[in-house]
Image: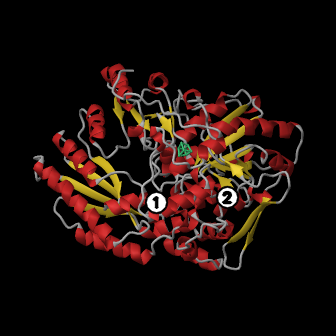
Amino acid sequence: MQQKLERLLPQVQKPARYTGGEWNSVTKDWDSVDVHMAFAFPDVYEVGMSFLGLQIIYNLVNQRQDALMERTFAPWVDMEELMRKHDIPLFTLESRRPVKDFDILGFTLQYEMTFTNILNMLNLSGLPLKSSDRDESMPLVIAGGPCAFNPEPIADFFDLVVLGEGEEVINEMLDAYKDARAANLTRQQLLLKLAKIEGVYVPSLYEVEYLESGKIKSVTPKQPDVPAKINKRLMRDVDNAPFPNQPIVPNIGAIHDRVMLEVQRGCTRGCRFCQAGVLYRPVREKTPETLMKQAEEIIKSTGHDEISLTSLSTADYSKVGPLITGLLDQHSGKGVNVSLPSLRVDAFSIDLAKEVQKVRRSTLTFAPEAGTQRLRDVINKGVTEEDLIKAVSAAFESGWHAIKLYFMIGLPTETYEDLDGIADMAKAVVKAGLEKGVSRGRLKVTVSTSSFVPKSHTAFQFEPQDTLEELKNKQQYLKSKLKDRFVSFNYHDSSTSFLEAALARGDRRLCAVVSRAYELGCRFDGWSECFKYDLWLKAFADVGLDPKWYAYQRYDYEDVLPWDHLNAGVSKRYLSLEHKRAIKEQPTIDCRGGKCPGCGLCPSMDIEPLVLGGNDDGQV
Ligand code: SF4
């Protein structure tokens, strides 16, 4: 294989995607460990290497004496073609071994539009797609990540799925796997054993029954000792959680080729469309002391010159001010920058941005999400137009001249007045820029919209998506309203969002659709140049299902939802209440300040939010 690869790599785009050997990558002696695990990222190398979760799990497994982890990524279409032509199976970057030789093959499910890539990777590995067709000699195929909270549309392809934070459960799973192998358990016995670990879902051990309406009647365990509900796992002590202080330095420009310093888990804002806000609850902040130490270790071990403070909402981290000051004091003399991936819509954020972007005056992005206060109350986005105008005015005063505003269209209850609100907001930002003296030649406001996709485990899980026609009309309407020399408008393709909605709220019957779409040639569906909408429609038609039924379904609170047996900790009762509040345009408080609106997670999982609080302007 080595020689074949050497010959083929010069023929593909970006050969470094497949070479491995990066700084800090780990290649262990195969025979010195008991368990061999491959981490599979169902997208290209550059996307996968920007995913912090990969670095965390890679570090954790490779720290064990008895296990190793290697990586594999989805080969781009040119490489796939050559691999098939020359009979090269999917291989790992570290040892260039076929993935099929490993004991466990673990996928991360970050986005629904990677599902066909998973099937392609299984097929390239020489493995049957369906778990029921795999035998004792084959790796256990597992998955984790946000889409694991509704894995039903791909349930047939996985032996098991892990709910929640992988670093909390991976060691238990590897121990159980090792014991099972030592005890010569069959694959079925092993799955039964693993199903008893909290957070582990073995889809084949559950029976799904349907009503005549097509909705779900029940999802029940096939055996008495398998849990009826699977609870997510979460880290209780994030400050002392395992951390990759020697992360792999990517060979080629990863999307985030920088130190990723995770300042907290979770977000308390409670935006009603946001799935991550539910899946990663409760908020748990790390101490600045730990973060300073981790930043220092990573800079030493990687040579990166930028520290990105990551989390769902970094500006909410209660020690963000002192942390930035401390990091800049310690590292800016060595040419190391600090960056913030997301800002709040307030002046405090501008102070932070000024602090970290001393040299560059790049575009600042804000996400008001909706154009009117009414709709922002519906989605529980606690920002006002006044907040936004104050923030952008402060930004213009401080030297920025380009602002990007991010909105969602098709949100529940949206009307054309809300779209007018988006246009009005863009105009108000332009006005603020001109008033603050930004030159007419440089002032630029970009309005970027995506289409709302109802996701499982959110207050809007019950809501239908707007029809494709409605979404397209809304995009055209906005386009006509945003004709302004200072404003540019871009929007995401709504047919991708439509399929994403069908898959995100789908059930087990969709496995046949995903499989058919793969057979028809769908790959890299999240990449506009590869997305083949017609083939997806054909796949649905071929198996006799309608994507509209899934994307446009309005669920009742009492309906059994395909993911109801998978518990993210926030109760369905609370999600229903939140949905009712949304329709009444009532906001819900943020639990960061100590007041709890009662989502049910903390009592049911015996945990509390960990917010450091205090001043955020002190010194570390
Ligand atoms: S139970 Fe209360 S404090 Fe805990 S995450 Fe939910 S809303 Fe926040």
The N terminus lies in quadrant: top right
User: Can the viewer see residue 474 in this picture?
Assistant: yes
**Tag 1 secondary structure:** loop
Label 2, label 1: how many angstroms apart (C-alpha)?
20 Å
Q: Which residue is mark 1?
A: 527
Q: What residue appears at the point 20 percent right and 54 percent down from the top-left corner?
A: 429
Amino acid type for the residue under numbered disc 2: Asn
Q: Residue at x 19, y 57 (%)?
A: 428
76 or 550: which is nearer to us? 550
Q: Amino acid at mark 1?
A: Trp
Residue 556 shown left or right of residue 14 in the figure = right
Instruction: In this rendered view, identify the residue nearer to me: 66 or 126.
Output: 66
| Badge 2 element | helix
Looking at the rendered structure, the number of numbered marks drawn on it comes to: 2
Residue 519, compared with residue 573, is above or below; it is: below
* Relative depth, front residue between 426 and 65: 426
Q: Which residue is mark 2?
A: 123
